Image (cartoon, rainbow, N blue to C red):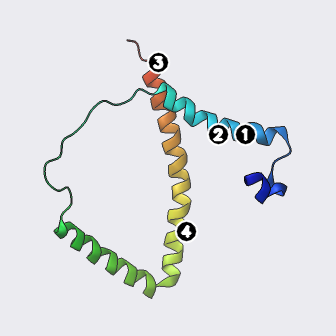
Amino acid sequence: MFFLLLPERIPKEPIAWFSILVWYIIPILLLKISKPNKQTRKISGEVYGMKDFVKFMLVMSVFVIGVCSVRDVSYTIVTVLLVSTIGLGVGLFLYNVVKAIRGRIKPK
């Protein structure tokens, strides 16, 4: 269906297809070489109760009112947070690659 919806966006260069395949192959290989974690934790009772929910709603209400009243500052904060998630994503990806490779190479 993708090919019917946007045929002009289908890449024609082989390097584009190669990069797409690499970005799909890397996570598949990481899942294949990483060992599954067999640990389980049994939790008794509630993890979060009504008291925690009320605290969360109060804090979120204060933040929403603050963001709505100071728009210029909130745009700056949101932009900084958005740009920082790009770096965080790259960092987490590299950390997981190194962790999976170290787990695979460890002597048995």
In terms of secondary structure, where does tag 2 sit? helix
Looking at the picture, which amino acid does disc 1 mark?
Answer: Ser
Residue located beneath label 2 in the image: 23
Residue located beneath label 1 in the image: 19
Looking at the picture, which amino acid does disc 2 mark?
Answer: Trp
Q: Mark 3 and mark 1: span between their CA atoms?
A: 26 Å
Is residue 34 shown left or right of residue 23? left
In primary-sequence order, the first of circles 3 and 1 is 1
In primary-sequence order, the first of circles 2 and 4 is 2
Q: Mark 3 and mark 2: span between their CA atoms?
A: 23 Å
Q: Quadrant of the C terminus?
A: top left
Residue located beneath label 4 in the image: 79
Count neighbours of disc 4 (C-alpha within 10 A) and say few if under 14, some if 14 to 19, many if 20 or more.
few
In primary-sequence order, the first of circles 3 and 2 is 2
Q: Between residues 87 and 35, which one lies in front from this camera angle?
A: 35
- Residue visible at 38% across and 29% down in the picture: 36
Outermost residue to the top = 108
**Is residue 54 positioned above or below 38 on the image?**
below
Count neighbours of disc 2 (C-alpha within 10 A) and say few if under 14, some if 14 to 19, many if 20 or more.
few
- Residue visible at 18% across and 41% down in the picture: 42
Q: Mark 2 and mark 1: span between their CA atoms?
A: 6 Å
In primary-sequence order, the first of circles 1 and 4 is 1
User: Is there a contact, CB below 8 Å, between mark 3 and mark 2?
Assistant: no
In primary-sequence order, the first of circles 4 and 3 is 4
Count neighbours of disc 1 (C-alpha within 10 A) and say few if under 14, some if 14 to 19, many if 20 or more.
few
Looking at the picture, which amino acid does disc 3 mark?
Answer: Ile
Residue located beneath label 3 in the image: 105
Looking at the picture, which amino acid does disc 4 mark?
Answer: Thr
